[in-house]
Amino acid sequence: MNIIDIAKLSGVSKSTVSRFLNNGYVSEESRNKIQRVIDETGFVPSAHGKILRTKKTDLIGVILPKISSETISKIVGGISEEISKHGYNIILGNTDLNIEKEIEYLNIFKNRNVDGIIFVATIITDKHLQIIKDIKVPIVIVGQYIDGYPCVYHSDYEAAYEMTEYLIKQGHNKIAYIGATDDDISAGLNRKNGYIDCLKNKNLTYYKEIIRVGDFSQAAGYNHAKNLLENNNDIDAIFCATYNMALGAMEYAKESNINIPNKISICAIGDSKISNLISPKLTTVQYYYEKSGIDSAKILMDIISSTVDSSDVKSIKLGYNLQIRESVK
């Protein structure tokens, strides 16, 4: 059974059936005839046929840095919640923080029938930018800011500045920092600069030798905290760019019988359920990850539905909230 058969049985033209299936204008009489034949025959339009007719797949490609991350699961939850309201489904591309995989998925979605792309980004290279420029479907960036594209990102500089300021107000004056690579503009460069600028503005000495760079892992936090505290006995606080790093730093301190927060204060950017369950409870900056997913999906749906042009969309910079707990004295 196909459109031609439906047209013959209904006594209408093939183009009329096509308009009916695509929600175009059809007279009430013809609509009733076609619907009656569909009901009697159990005809179901094929997904492939729908794609050919409408040029739409109802699929959104979502590229993620690490699907197992609690942070990423919140973002995906927000995306899924919003796009499901519009009848769309998600195809996930998990890259495991591998830049080459990100490039691969951008190419896959560029050449595959998806109606739009949400890219949860970490490091943006020239190769990324070239492929993004060549993508013909709407794309929204989450977690980084790229000029000329709709983005949903966090107040990384401001959050790091305020957390450093809080540590200083609590009486800390030699604050070590465990961060990410500067290639990651948001989590790496912007957070580090917020920390450094606050120290300078508060007339505190900025020590390059107590800044460390690692990946986002707990192991990185552990190893850098070990190195810092074994070689600098006057450090009174460690500020970590991610909560995983902070968990590692706390693990080392506990193993070494370094009391938190009496001997060393530890804090981080990025909140987690774990932050409120461990002892002592971790002081963090809370980001609105689920909202970033919802907002990015809303922007994408608006562009796809032609409510707005992508060039007219303003990027969204989300706020944050300091969660003051027990790990900072």
Image: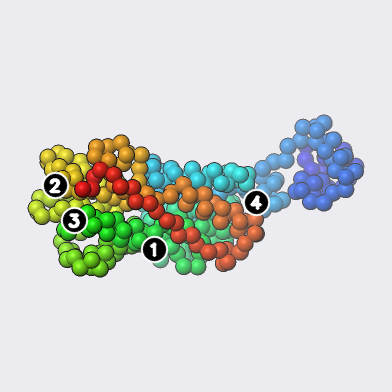
Mark 1 to mark 3 CA distance (whole Å): 37 Å
Q: Amino acid at mark 3?
A: His
Mark 3 to mark 2 CA distance (whole Å): 11 Å
Would you say the residues marked 4 and 3 are in contact, meaning their CB atoms lie under 8 Å apart? no
The residue tagged 1 is: 125
Coordinates of residue 272 in the picture (x, y in percent)? 35, 42
Residue at position x 53%, y 58% in the image: 139
User: Mark 4 falls on what kind of element?
Assistant: loop
Coordinates of residue 187 in the picture (x, y in percent)? 34, 57
Residue at position x 46%, y 47% in the image: 290
Earlier-in-chain disc, 3 versus 2: 3
Q: Amino acid at mark 4?
A: Lys
Relative depth, front residue between 94 and 265: 265
User: Mark 1 falls on what kind of element?
Assistant: loop
The residue tagged 3 is: 172
Q: Amino acid at mark 2?
A: Lys
Mark 2 to mark 1 CA distance (whole Å): 41 Å
Tell me, yes or no, if residue 93 can be seen here: no
Earlier-in-chain disc, 4 versus 3: 4
Tell me the quadrant of the picture where the N terminus can be found: top right
Earlier-in-chain disc, 1 versus 3: 1
Mark 4 to mark 3 CA distance (whole Å): 57 Å
Tell me, yes or no, if residue 259 can be seen here: yes
Earlier-in-chain disc, 4 versus 1: 4
Question: What is the image's colouring?
Answer: rainbow
User: Mark 3 falls on what kind of element?
Assistant: loop
